[in-house]
C-alpha cells in the first residue's frame, strides 16, 4: 500500500494532494498537460523534494518533512520508466538493463541472473545483444521496463509509457503491457493523458487538475458520476453543474444551471441518491446533471412530446464518429455527434444521432434546431 501527501510549489505552480495506491494494483494519474501528473511521479521517486509531505510504502517511510526523513532516490526500491525510455544507444539490451545494477556494485553472476529474469518477464529473452536502434518501439519500451524490474522494485512508476509510440504500435503494445503488469503484481502508478489507457490499466483512476485531485475512483465512478466538464468530455456525456432548485416529485427535481455567459437555465432530471447521503439533498445544494447524448432527440420544429427539457439552438459542430478497432482504415459506424449551442446558455449540448437522421433533417453547421430530452433520461446527483 502506498500513501503519499504533498504540498509544494514549483515556481508559480502549486501542488497539494493526498494519494493512495492499492498494493499490487495499478493507479492511473489522468489529466491534461500541466496538471501535475509527472511532478507527482518525480516527487515519489525522490527526483524532486516537496516543501511538505510524506511517502510511505508498505509501512516504510521514504520521506517525511516533519521528521526530516528523506531517503535518496537510488536507495528507494522504486522503478521509474521515463516517457522517452532514456535507453543508451551505444549499449546492448543487456547493458541497458544492467546499468542500474552495476551502479550498486553487484557481483557479475547476480547481474547476469537479474538481467535474464527481467528480460524473460517482458518477453525479450534472446535479444540481449541487440542495440536499441535494432528494436521496434514496443521492444524499446519493454527494455525500459526490464531495466526498472531488474532492480526488483516494490513500486513501479510509469510516465506516459505509450506516448512515444505511433498509433498502430500503441494498439499492439497496450495489451502486452497490461499482461505484464497483471503478471508482475507490483504496486504501480502510471501517468497518462489518454482516457482509454486510464480505462484499460487503472484499478483506480485519479484525475488531476492544476495540482490537485479533481476526482478519483474506478471506471464506473467516473463514467456515472463525473464531477467536472473535463471528465464528462472524456467519458462522452453531457454535463451540467448547478444547484438543486426544487423537488418536482419524489423522483424528479429541477437543477438550476448558471454559466458566465447568459441567464440561468433549469434542467429537470431524475434525482439519484448516493452514499453517504442518508437523507434527500436539500434545495440550494450543489448538484450535477448528466445526459447521455443518445437520449437527446433533434427536430426542426418544437417537439410535441412529453420531454421536460427542450432547447432551441444553433448547430456549431457535426462530427461523424469513426471506429478503427480491428481495421487498418477508420470506418464510419453510422453515428453522428451534433453539438448544439442553446440560445439561453453558452453551455453546449451534444446529441448523438444516426447518419440517416442527419440526412433526413439536413443537419449542417449554422442551422437552428430543437434538442429535447425527458427528465427520466437525465440523472441528477449531489
Image: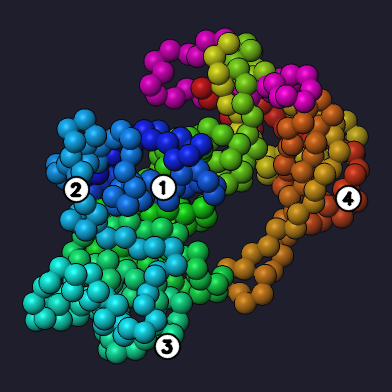
Give the tally of numbered discs: 4
* Crowd rating for badge 4 (residues with CA inside 10 Å; few <14, some 14–19, many 20+): some
The residue nearer to you, when weighing 150 against 205, is 150
Say what secondary structure mark 4 lies in: loop
Sooner in the amino-acid sequence: mark 1 or mark 3: 1
Sooner in the amino-acid sequence: mark 4 or mark 3: 3
Q: CA distance from mark 4 to mark 1?
A: 44 Å
Left or right placement of residue 140 versus residue 124 in this view: right
Q: CA distance from mark 2 to mark 4?
A: 61 Å
Residues drawn in magenta: 257-283
The residue nearer to you, when weighing 295 against 168, is 168
Q: Which mark is residue 364?
A: 4
Sooner in the amino-acid sequence: mark 2 or mark 4: 2
Query: Residue placed farthest to the front in the image?
Result: 11
Q: Is residue 16 above or below residue 100?
A: above
- Name the magenta segment's main secondary structure: loop
Q: Is residue 67 magenta?
A: no
* Crowd rating for badge 2 (residues with CA inside 10 Å; few <14, some 14–19, many 20+): some
Where residue 343 appears, as percent x and y from the top left, is: 84, 29
Residue on which the image places disc 2: 71
Q: CA distance from mark 4 to mark 3?
A: 50 Å
Q: Tell me the residue at 50%/43% (across/down).
A: 35
Where residue 207 appears, as percent x and y from the top left, is: 46, 41
Amino acid at each position: 500500500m502506498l500513501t503519499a501527501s504533498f504540498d509544494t510549489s514549483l515556481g508559480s505552480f502549486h501542488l497539494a494532494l493526498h494519494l493512495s495506491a492499492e498494493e499490487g494494483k495499478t493507479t492511473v494519474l489522468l489529466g491534461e498537460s500541466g496538471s501535475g501528473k509527472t511532478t507527482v511521479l518525480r516527487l515519489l521517486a525522490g527526483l524532486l523534494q516537496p516543501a511538505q509531505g510524506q511517502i510511505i510504502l508498505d509501512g516504510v517511510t521514504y520521506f517525511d518533512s516533519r521528521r526530516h526523513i528523506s531517503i535518496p532516490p537510488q536507495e528507494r526500491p522504486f522503478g521509474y520508466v521515463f516517457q522517452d525510455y532514456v535507453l543508451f544507444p551505444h549499449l546492448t539490451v543487456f547493458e541497458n538493463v544492467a546499468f542500474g545494477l552495476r551502479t550498486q556494485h553487484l557481483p557479475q553472476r547476480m547481474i547476469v541472473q537479474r538481467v535474464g529474469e527481467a528480460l524473460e518477464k517482458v518477453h525479450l529473452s534472446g535479444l540481449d545483444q541487440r542495440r536499441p536502434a535494432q528494436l521496434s518501439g514496443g521492444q524499446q519500451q519493454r527494455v525500459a521496463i526490464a531495466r526498472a524490474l531488474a532492480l526488483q522494485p516494490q513500486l513501479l512508476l510509469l510516465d506516459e509509457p505509450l506516448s512515444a509510440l505511433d498509433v498502430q504500435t500503441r494498439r499492439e503494445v497496450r495489451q502486452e503491457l497490461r499482461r505484464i503488469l497483471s503478471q508482475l503484481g507490483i504496486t504501480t502508478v502510471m501517468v497518462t493523458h489518454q482516457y482509454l489507457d486510464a480505462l484499460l490499466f487503472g484499478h483506480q483512476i485519479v484525475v488531476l487538475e492544476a495540482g490537485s485531485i479533481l476526482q478519483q475512483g474506478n471506471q464506473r465512478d467516473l463514467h456515472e458520476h463525473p464531477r467536472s466538464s473535463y471528465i464528462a468530455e472524456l467519458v462522452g456525456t453531457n454535463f451540467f453543474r448547478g444547484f438543486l432548485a426544487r423537488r418536482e416529485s419524489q423522483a424528479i427535481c429541477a437543477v438550476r444551471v448558471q454559466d458566465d455567459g447568459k441567464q440561468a437555465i433549469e434542467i429537470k432530471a431524475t434525482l439519484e441518491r448516493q452514499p453517504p447521503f442518508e437523507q434527500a439533498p436539500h434545495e440550494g445544494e450543489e448538484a450535477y446533471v448528466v445526459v447521455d447524448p443518445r437520449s437527446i432527440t433533434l427536430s426542426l420544429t418544437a417537439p410535441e412530446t412529453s420531454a421536460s427539457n427542450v432547447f432551441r439552438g444553433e448547430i456549431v459542430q457535426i462530427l461523424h464518429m469513426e471506429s478503427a478497432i480491428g481495421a487498418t482504415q477508420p470506418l464510419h459506424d453510422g453515428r453522428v455527434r451534433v453539438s448544439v449551442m442553446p440560445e439561453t446558455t453558452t453551455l453546449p449540448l451534444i446529441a448523438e444521432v444516426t447518419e440517416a437522421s442527419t440526412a433526413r433533417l439536413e443537419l449542417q453547421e449554422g442551422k437552428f434546431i430543437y434538442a429535447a430530452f425527458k427528465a427520466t433520461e437525465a440523472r441528477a446527483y449531489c
